[in-house]
Amino acid sequence: ETGVTQTPRHLVMGMTNKKSLKCEQHLGHNAMYWYKQSAKKPLELMFVYSLEERVENNSVPSRFSPECPNSSHLFLHLHTLQPEDSALYLCASSQEGSPLHFGNGTRLTVT
Amino acid sequence: AQSVTQLDSQVPVFEEAPVELRCNYSSSVSVYLFWYVQYPNQGLQLLLKYLSGSTLVKGINGFEAEFNKSQTSFHLRKPSVHISDTAEYFCAAFPSGGYQKVTFGIGTKLQVIP
């Protein structure tokens, strides 16, 4: 069992759909993150939750909406996405001062 | 704020040959440095980390990295690569304090040729 589990692994959605990505961590960490990974670009930090409060929001379009109901779960709600939003979305967790632990990601394709 | 530069986007190397993947950083504060590896269709896995102490850091799978403060570098090395080392490698830095605000390099694809 990996420490950080993401579902689904693959998602294809139309621009008018609404879907959600789920992340669960089993490491007892107190911070969780969403990253976007696109080809030939550095990883982009989207959101950070620390102790269930959002502490970072890097100018992400409102069509991406995060939710952190508790320290073990993180969601990314998606609606009216654009084709350029197609990417690998990575969830990570950490304890303050320790390295990030990543999930295997959700490969999102927007058609 | 900090930045991380990986100078090579792709590095081809023959099996059993040595390899060095380069990483330079800049920061106005002290940073911790990391290397992560990403295999196809997977997330990032921590390879090694430098927090303090000895500048030569050993990681998993036979990799090591050396922190050089004067040259602001943290190059990754392996004396003899294996086919299974084919992956993408990311250098990362985050400030030594507060919650994490990690900066990643753009990644280097290591291709091991049989």
Image (tube, rainbow, N blue to C red):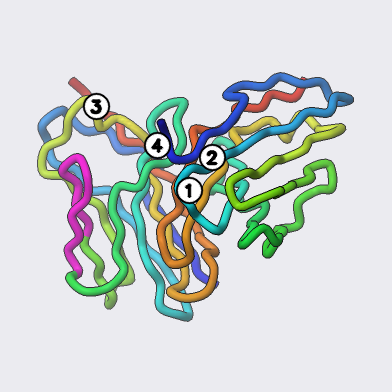
Classify residue A53 as left or right of residue A107: right
For the N terminus of chain A, the image quarter is top left
Name the residue tied to disc 1.
B106
Contact check, label 1 and label 2, Cβ < 8 Å: yes
Whichever of callouts 4 and 3 sits on the residue coming sooner in the sequence is 4
Q: Chain of mark 2?
A: A
Q: CA distance from mark 2 to mark 3?
A: 22 Å
Query: Which residue is at 60% across, 28% downward?
Result: A7
Q: Is residue B95 left or right of residue A13?
A: left
Asked which secondary structure carries label 2, the reply is loop
Residue beneath label 2, please? Answer: A40
Q: CA distance from mark 2 to mark 4?
A: 14 Å
Q: Chain of mark 4?
A: B
Are there few (<14), some (14-19), or many (20+) residues within 10 Å of tag 4? many
Asked if the stretch drawn in magenta spans residue A76, the answer is no
Give the magenta-colored segment's residue range. B55-65
Q: Read off the residue under disc 3.
A: B84
Q: Which residue is mark 4?
A: B38
Where residue B61 sits, quadrant-wise, is top left
